[in-house]
Each structure stands twice: as structure tokens, then as C-alpha cells.
Amino acid sequence: MFDRVKMFGIEIDRLTMDQAVAQLLDWIGEQEYHCRYVVTPNVDHIVKLQNNEAFRIVYKDAEMVVVDGKPVLWASRLLNKLLPETVPGSDLCPALFEAARARGKLRVFLLGAADGVADRAATAIQERWPWVEICGTYSPPMGFSASSPANEVALEKINAARPDVLVIGLGAPKQEIWVHAMRDQLNVKVALCVGATIDFLAGEKIRAPHWIRKIGLEWLHRALSEPRRLLLRYMHDAWVFPWLVIREWLSK
């Protein structure tokens, strides 16, 4: 078990990007197909976790919890929890692909995004990291969940491919709740719950410039890029999260 700190009712691993990637490669190197899943808490997750018991259970059972988002990192320092750095899912995937060069091969399945997007992401990945084999993609229909008819299709495709890594881009908390429910039925070694990462890899969505990410405003860039879908949610999060930090500080 990693060194973990407790914040906002969950435990977060004190891991750098390099340490997280090294641990993922260790798990991938094992012979057994035992699904270990990774979650990446950001401000939106922290807000949702306060009133979503199923989401909290998912976090409790996750094998790796790495902080995604500067505001959560800064909160850890204010609260004297001292997380070392952010390990965003959108950076973790490319870092893992790059580090897998030494293995010579990495089998990856992409689950999520709109029709055709995962296929474009697969092409982009294999052009940039030729040692990464995209062994399958599946874009499930709207309403996809562990209890939907499409779930059997997803399981059949993933398990037939037997990937080292399952990249899940279904949005939170759907992706986390799904992998938690299905983890005992998945023939994968590692599952990464990484939101819009498939869209970013495909070029479907554009990430914030590095300087915006560095000052902790990637959430605002995303909200303004997709205002109809994200603006109200993120503005709500921006209002609630500081109060959660104050509550956490007072509880000390």
C-alpha cells in the first residue's frame, strides 16, 4: 500500500508521476489478469463525493488514487497533507505509453468517447507510440452502465482482447462506478478512469495551454470550451470547493 493522506473523506496516494507510472508498469508486468483500477480526483470529483455514497465506495476500493488538478494539490498543502504533485489522467496515459517503450509492447483497449473518436485516438496513439498496440475500441451508446444491454457487448470485446491497460473515458462518476462493478469480470491488468483523455488523444478536444494548466485554471478553460455542458457545473464546483476546504481545515 502506498503512503496515503486523508482529505475530504477519501484517501489520496502521495505519488509523483514517475512513481505512479513505475507502479503501473509493475502491475502490467504480472502474469495474472487482475483488474486494478486508478481514479484521479479533481475538484468536480471532490464535490460529487460529498453526496454520492456509491462514488465514495469506488474510491475506497481503488488500487491507486492520484490527484488531478492544481486546486486539490494546493488544498493538500494548505491542510498540511503535502501531496507531491498532480498526476492528471490526461498526462498519465501518455507518460505510461512513453515509459512502456522499454517493454517493447503494450496492449491497450479504449472504452468511451463518441462514435469514431476512439478509432481516431487509436491511430494517433500508434503513430506516436508504435510499441503501443491498440487491441480494441468500443464507444458504448448513451445510457451505458453495468446494467444496460450494451454492457455484455463491452465485456465481450474487452475480455476477448485481453489488454494490459483499459483506458476508460465515460465521464465521472459513471466510469468509476462501472469499473468498480465490473472489476471482477474484466480480463485486464490495469484500468485507468481518465475522462476526456480519449478525446484529447484523438484531437477531438483541445487541452488548455501548459501555462493555464500550471496556474490551475484548466477547469475554466474546459468550461469555456464546452459552456453548455460544463460551465454551470464547474461554476458550482468553484463555489462549493472552497467551503469544503474551510470545513476540512476547521475539522483539524
Image (cartoon, rainbow, N blue to C red):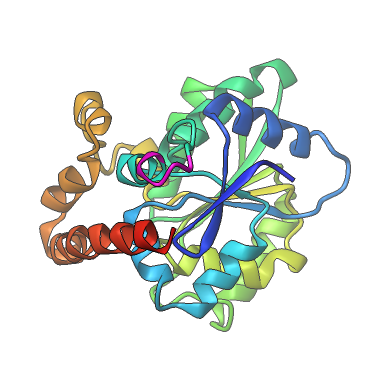
Left or right side of 174 for 192: right
- Residue 52 showing in the rendered view: yes
| Residue drawn at point x = 48 percent, y = 49 percent | 40
Establish if 106 lies above or below 63. above
Q: Return the x and y of residue 143 as percentages of the image width and height.
A: 41, 78
| Residue drawn at point x = 75 percent, y = 37 percent | 28
Number of numbered discs visible in the structure rendering: 0
Q: Main secondary structure of the magenta part?
A: loop
Quadrant assignment, res 238: bottom left
Left or right side of 194 for 103: right
- Residue 154 showing in the rendered view: no
| Residue drawn at point x = 66 percent, y = 57 percent | 158
Q: Return the x and y of residue 108 as percentages of the image width and height.
A: 62, 41
Q: Residue furthest top?
A: 102
Establish if 250 lies above or below 92. below
Depth order, front residue of 175/213: 213
Per the image, is 79 magenta? yes
Q: Return the x and y of residue 198 as percentages of the image width and height.
A: 42, 45
Left or right side of 211 for 180: right
| Residue drawn at point x = 40 percent, y = 78 percent | 51
Q: Which residues are magenta?
A: 77-81
Quadrant assignment, res 15: top right
Establish if 135 lies above or below 84. below
Q: Quadrant of the C terminus?
A: bottom left
Q: Return the x and y of residue 63 as percentages of the image width and height.
A: 68, 52
Depth order, front residue of 127/29: 29
Depth order, front residue of 11/153: 11
Per the image, is 12 magenta? no
